[in-house]
Image (tube, coloured by chain):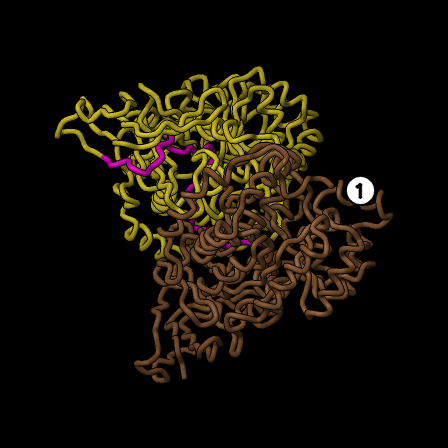
Chain colours: A yellow, B brown
Amino acid sequence: MTTLAILNCDVLKVENKTASVVTGQDILIEKDKIEKIIPHASAMIDQNTSKIDGHGLLAMPGLINTHAHTPMVYFRGLVEDVTVEEWFNDYIWPMESNLTEEDVYWGMLLGMAEMIESGVTTVADHYFYMDQEAEAVKESGMRANLAWAVFGHQGEKGLDRTVEFIRKWNDSANGRIITWLGPHAPYTTTPDFLKLVVVKAKELGVGIHIHVSETRDQVQNSLRDYDLTPVKLLQQVGVLDHPTLLVHCSFATDEDIEILTHYPVGVAQAPKTYMKAGVGLAPVLKFLKKGIPVGLASDGAASNNTLDILEQLRLMVLSQRVSLTDPLILPVGELLDMAFRSSARVSGFGDSIGELKENKLADIALIRQDGLQNFPCFNPAVNLVYSVQPSQFDNVICNGKVLMQNHQLKTINKDKVKQEISKRLERMTQRENGKSIAFYPS
Amino acid sequence: MTTLAILNCDVLKVENKTASVVTGQDILIEKDKIEKIIPHASAMIDQNTSKIDGHGLLAMPGLINTHAHTPMVYFRGLVEDVTVEEWFNDYIWPMESNLTEEDVYWGMLLGMAEMIESGVTTVADHYFYMDQEAEAVKESGMRANLAWAVFGHQGEKGLDRTVEFIRKWNDSANGRIITWLGPHAPYTTTPDFLKLVVVKAKELGVGIHIHVSETRDQVQNSLRDYDLTPVKLLQQVGVLDHPTLLVHCSFATDEDIEILTHYPVGVAQAPKTYMKAGVGLAPVLKFLKKGIPVGLASDGAASNNTLDILEQLRLMVLSQRVSLTDPLILPVGELLDMAFRSSARVSGFGDSIGELKENKLADIALIRQDGLQNFPCFNPAVNLVYSVQPSQFDNVICNGKVLMQNHQLKTINKDKVKQEISKRLERMTQRENGKSIAFYPS
């Protein structure tokens, strides 16, 4: 039985890296799945079916944020125009020491509210106090792959706490929540610690979400200490044998890339963060050429300022083209394939999401096409990449449930969340000497 | 007598390249000028003063678009993922041959509606059939520096038509419209033609708006043909002796930059266009170091897709940082100085706009600060650069007159404009063999 129907919308299709739009379609949803996409389906539904008027709206798969530290919205715009080292050591890590479990809960809700408003239905998050994140995800209706960040100095005890979290939450909230292990990075752990992570991953049957080769220094230090690039080190300790979400990989070597083709990995990319921080861009075109899935990511709003995945999509093509001085790379269809199907694979949800098609999970974002910046509209797919603003998202559905309708959030009380955040800001932004979750670089 | 008052807003100040925000201010406007900015001014106004509730809004100078071909909104998103040569020769220039005077009028209105909605109050435009542009600017209430584009092959007769336009429209619409000469570029004219332009500029007492050194090829060809870089050629023929708006200057040499420091010039920059087209970025930091004013620009929406100057502001810092791998360049205050005071100088309106201060012209944009992507808000100036969306502009005032209130346009009938544009699209997008306004490269 059809539980929800979106009537008379335009539908974005991305097939063989080519984008097209089919107009005048009805999308029928049964519980958590897309049942059918056909024109004139109103005869097939009855008064028990919830209906959304899709006229003038473009339906696309919900956007996927393949790497975030969502509760870092607390620090949005607070630390700007400093070096990466100052940013971590003098500001972010000392401030993150102030975080309580409840802070994480409210920060997660704030970030998810922003993401839902921007058409994002799935996030792969990497942070602390993940039980609270999971509670917040359960409430919000979003889909999430949650990894509890753990540093080497926290030892087996620290790792075990994250394992407990996985046992409690993996495949919960009607399948909306999956959980992976979250060792922070090769440079903040040790090979022995990572080997322990691999043992746990095998035991639990879960993947691993880890930062890798974000800066040239990280690669140099790894070569100095282990005679291996960070990617090779991950290979050697066995991490890559498991589904792995590699974050950044900005300084992956050609040999690293060749290695990665043999493993079940995906790479998360947050172009705005890299640009703003003046670090190099990852060899995205080389990853794509070798068939390594690349996903779009916001990273934390403390560096990226927003959790806007459309902005990352636009910056992905703009940054790669200016860096490679080539106007023909990343055409619209290829970009949208990255945003949807490829990001779905990177996020750990495989091919269950990222496409509007029968039997896929019903994660759908509907965007208004009537803004002046979209007019005239020769090709809605082009406008999606180069013109639209995230404020134009009107309806967002995840797992068959409406999270936003007519731009009104349905599952999160925005005012209450803003109040709770405001109460916490003064305490959260204190910086005490010597109080820090880690030191960068190691 | 105060004609318009904005009550209880926050005001953005940019002084000595440092941004700050003063809360709880009233902005009093008398006719076309800012009279006073003080708190609690309500006792000073009476029932004859129009009032705008500024609570929750950040007031900033209206944004300035220092180089556009506004009516090119007709071709937005139509030609993507092709080389620069194909873009010009196979698509844009043949299609522009279809333009009629009336097309330009409606295209100008559409583009201005988009700009006003995005907080832009001033545009330096470079196009054809400029009488119609000027009529549209007069109606819209925007401020504009209009230049009628002319190619060398049009000869003195072509140039004379643009001179007539200047005689008719310079310093009109209560000073909102100024007019400059618009020779297209050194590569589409000849040194003799440019010398003729200089004669006319001296006669008329106006400036010159010209494309320069956009690609490496243009510089190479100029060296081949004249043994001079395009910038040196402009110096030699006398163009630089007049106020000159140099568009692009992406491949200006160090010697070119040294030359430019001696002349009354400004440089317009459209980072999104350069990134998308995969051409190199201009040496913006070198311009700034030498005190050459740099302004933000959208160029045409056919290449840039939007006329959104906030997007250019963000892309300016992101593109320069990734290109120079330096996170410390273009801090927020310096960027905002570029967006306002420096862009004002580049646009040809000098220091009469670009600052919220007594006796400046009342060009003011008010932006909502309540979006989730702006929350928490530690520093509204930072959010302006890295978080806000142009859809958050709520009120726009130009020359003391309200052009948009509560996001509703007051001077342009959007629906009527969209209808008129729609009627023209089929004819406008025909491409006839051999029909082209020019050929690129020359």
Q: Residue furthest left?
A: A47
Q: Position of residue A136 (x, y in %)?
A: 31, 39
Seen in the image, is A167 located left or right of residue A259?
left
The C terminus of chain B, quarter of image: top right
From where the camera sits, is residue A435 visible? no
Name the residue located 67 percent from the left edge and 26 percent from the top edge: A253
Q: Position of residue A167 (x, y in %)?
A: 35, 25
Depth check: B72 or A71 in front? B72
Q: Position of residue A367 (x, y in %)?
A: 36, 39
Name the residue located 52 percent from the left edge and 22 percent from the top edge: A265
Q: Position of residue B64 (x, y in %)?
A: 55, 60
Depth check: A225 or B112 in front? B112
Q: Start and end of the magenta stretch?
A: A52-81
Seen in the image, is A10 located left or right of residue B315?
left
Query: Circle 1 sits on which residue?
Result: B221
Name the residue located 45 percent from the left edge and 55 percent from the top edge: B109
Q: Give above or below for B97 relative to B112.
A: above
> The residue under label 1 is which amino acid type?
Asn
From where the camera sits, is residue A401 visible? yes
* Residue A54 counted in the magenta span: yes
